[in-house]
Amino acid sequence: MSVYKKLAQARVMLQNVEMTKSGNNKFAGYKYFELGDFMPHINRIFNEVGLCGYVSFDKEEATLTIRDVDGDDPGIHITSPMAEAQLKGCHPVQNLGAVETYQRRYLWVTALEIVEHDALDSSEPVKQVDLTDFESALESATDLKNLMYIWGTIPKEHHKALKAKAAEVKARLEGK
């Protein structure tokens, strides 16, 4: 059986597995699959059908290679361009780990056709505001998404001074 047929079989087998989304994006209000939600199922299914998948990284792209454990074919290669993560308060190696974790997740979701919530299509566009006067911009925030957009665009030197103001606006928007 070809690696493609085995992958198709694995996809159907995974569709018949009840999976729970443990990831929770509180900001955008949706749940998503984390690696731990589906990898044990994929590993079991791949073992059953005779496939092996492994992820590798270089500076330009991440690659998931799926091979037939009994064959000599070159396998299926799924790639994704590398990107950077800039998580607040993290060291460079932690940001690298975040990138690699996201890449692994997205590669496996692509390979196994795992259907997720489409955050881009279902979310309201962020209202663009004039950020020349940061305090006014915070006051004009219409919802938490706008507040987070504004906060994320304010230069770091203004963060400390406007932190209390942001908390007030957030409380107002949450109706507290």
Image: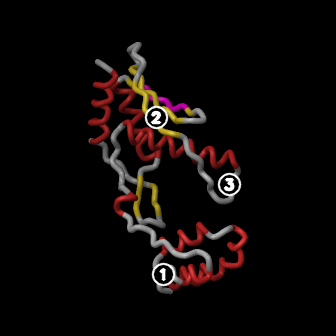
Q: Which residues are magenta?
A: 52-56
Residue 47, percent from left and from top: 39, 27
Mark 2 surroundings within 10 Å by alpha-carbon count, few (fewer than 14), some (14 through 19), many (20 or more): many
Instruction: Please say if 94 is above or below 158.
Output: above
Which residue is farthest top? Answer: 72
Residue 90 badge: 3
Q: Is residue 91 magenta?
A: no
Residue 123, percent from left and from top: 38, 65
Residue found at x 51% / y 79%: 141
On screen, residue 148 versus residue 31, left or right, reads: right
Mark pair 3, 2: CA separation: 26 Å
Residue 167, percent from left and from top: 60, 80
Q: Where on the picture, by quarter, is residue 67? A: top left
Q: Nearer the viewer, residue 174 or 14?
A: 174
Residue found at x 63% / y 44%: 96
Q: Nearer the viewer, mark 3 or mark 2?
A: 2
Instruction: Please say if 99 is above or below 42.
Output: below
Residue 52 badge: none
**Residue on which the image places disc 2:** 79
Q: Nearer the viewer, residue 17 or 134?
A: 134
Residue 174 badge: 1
User: Which circle's residue, 2 or 1, is located before the other in the chain?
Assistant: 2
| SS for dot 1 | loop
Q: Amino acid at mark 3?
A: Cys
Dominant secondary structure, magenta:
strand
Residue 101, percent from left and from top: 54, 44
Mark pair 2, 1: CA separation: 41 Å
